[in-house]
Image (tube, grey):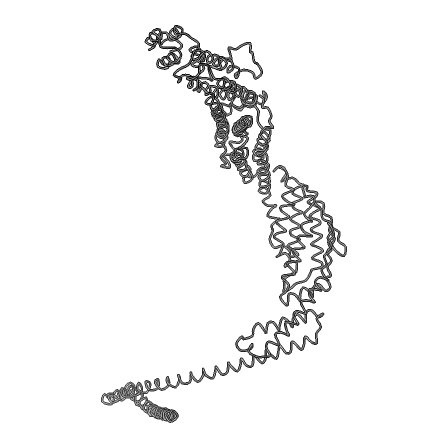
Amino acid sequence: MASLVSEILMSAGQYEKRDLQTELEKVKRKIDDAKFQVSKFVEQHYLDFDPLLVHSRELVETSSKLSEEVEELVAKAETELKFQLDSSTNEFNSIGSQINAAKLQVQLLERVSRLHTILESLKRVTVEDLILYAEAIAEAESILDDAEDQIDTELDIWGSVKFEIELNKDQLLKHLENSWNTEIQWIKKDSITQLKLNPDKLKDVFQALAIVGQLDRPLYDWSSRLFEDILVPLTKADTVISIEENLELTEGERPITELAELETAVKNISLTFQHLNQHLDFELKDVRVLQLVGQQIADEFAKLFVKTCLKSTLPSSSSLLSSPEYEKALQMVVGLEQEMIDNGFMTERVIEEFSVNVDLFFADKQCLESLSRARQLMCLDLHDTIYLKDNIEQTIVEEEERNNAETAHLWKMLSEGGMEVKWSPFRFPHCQISRSTQDLIEMLTNLVQEAGLSSATERSSARLLFTVRSICELYVSVVPEYHRDALEKLPFHAAVAHNNGMYLAHSILTLGTGHLIKLVQQNAVPLMDLVGKFRQLAAHIFLEHMKRQRDQLLAILKEAGFNRLESESKLPASVEKAGRQVLHQLRNLQKIWQPVLPLEVYLRAIGTLSNSVLEELLLRITTMEDIPAAAALQLADQCQNFTNTLPLLFGPVNDEEPEDKTEMVALVLQHIHLWARFEELRHLLGAGLRDIEGRWSSGKGPLAAHFAADEVKQMIRALFQNTDHRAATLSRIK
């Protein structure tokens, strides 16, 4: 049925095609006839001037009809041609698919045939013919990689061919591995390393490995060993090399520190690369072997050389950077880098960049060394001290700087804090500081002087000054934390740490004076704010320790047993013992602090602690409701012990009986604010009612100057029994 329809449609289509061609021929003839009529009409109209209006109208009607017939034919042609075009396209696609399938079959046959040819050629070529063998294996692998998974690999023969190729490749790789170990030999014994290269066959081994894509791993391993066993030892001062047929190296241990050692290292490295270039002077895919080695280790070697050779031989002063000896050394190093660039080992000028920015590397080295050394100094024991004494000659120089307009404002800043001698703010008072602190200050001074040298660039000067600031900030963070236990428990360490902080603050202000101010302004590096940080640190450390000492003294008095006086007729032995203990501790602090602290600081410190002790005694005694007569006399004796001992704290350490007590008494009155009140309490404990009333003297006597009327009445009630005389006296105390 379907075939019958197809035949009908096909015959109909052929009939339509014949009818269309007939109609086209008819129309064409009519068009030719119309063209002739129009031509004739135009000729008659424009040449013969024959008015043929009627004939022209007939021609117009004929042309219109012809136009309509043409449009109908065009529409019919488009419909028929489009249908036939679609049919032709489907037929073309079907034929194209068949052709592609045929092509794939042909390609498959070609691949299998070529693989067979390669396998046959591998049977005729020995594995010693490395290049031919490797090229065959590479071509076979390329064919296998390009295979179509769904067509080629479905063949039974495909797996067998692939397995055969892999066997041949394994045989080649094993032979190449043996050849590699034969042509490149490492002999290492103790500190001696020997490298043997056979340039005759080495090229074929490299090329064969590159062809089969197996060069990366052995090249990486060999490059790494070259770096570790050859190049790293060459950056040491006492390494020796010998190059005849082979390269032999005796590794040293001493680091490079001098320019002469740097020159030797450069020569050794240059000879080594000349030897390598001589034996590895061939290309792999337009890339030199040394370039491939350089891609593995060049950057690491450049960094190592800069760190261990160039940075270690930087001079101690920036002024030496422009010396002929150092410039010659830099030119020699740049020449070595150019040599390595020429042979392809290096591509970037890392070493030349060092020579261009040598001032920054110099500053970085000095900064890192200074920071490391500073931290070590901060962690040293504080008890290793030195004495700071007045330097008259230095004072004269500093007094001359006082008249400098740029440093005049420092006088006011230096005089703050209570540490400096009043007649010369540039002088630090006599005291003890840690030796490590003195070394630290010398380091800071050297950094500032280095930053101020004319040879120092603006960049290096700024880095050096920032290092000064970093060291100071590091001190504020490290010292109180590292020495925490000692600062809390040992009064000597607390006093020394206080002096260290104050002396550092003093040194920052006087470090270069006007010269430092210019440097700081030029480089925008703030340093003056560090003065306040050092002083706050010093004050905090010492005040915290003083609080612990005060708490210990007050704890002794609180546990002495004053509250038992109301139930006992005599003063408990524990009170007397506590008094001796407190005085002993204060005398011990005197022995520790007096030789260490500046005099003014010591007097304020010992006076503050003494005042706290007297305040506690006054509180304990004046708040008692009943003091037996015998106990009152014993308390008076105890108070007398304090009044006899405390003034000794303001005199020389070992002077138990000073001849002139006037100065000591003046210092006591200045620094112990409760001294006069305590003296009045001592008088009151041993006095009678008449004496008390006399010292009160209607509110104008010495007793009234330090005690309120209620306090005096409280003491009278505690000391005396209730009698008419006591009542009369109490009535007059007001």
User: Residue reaching furthest left?
Assistant: 54
Q: Is residue 20 above or below residue 718?
A: below
User: Dividing the picture into quarters, in which one does residue 220 lie?
Assistant: bottom right
Horizontally, is 154 left or right of 309 in the view? left
Residue 622 at what x, y percent from top left? 40, 16
Q: Name the foreground residue: 16 vs 666.
A: 666
Task: Tell me if I can see residue 154 in this picture.
Answer: yes
Q: Taking 592 as reference, is 206 above or below it? A: below
From where the camera sits, is residue 514 visible?
A: no
Residue 219 image point, x, y percent: 65, 60
Q: Quadrant of residue 91?
A: bottom left
Above or below residue 681? Residue 1 is below
Which corner quadrant holds the C terminus?
Answer: top left
Q: How many marks?
A: 0
Quarter of the image with the N terminus is bottom left
Q: Is residue 311 left or right of residue 419?
A: right
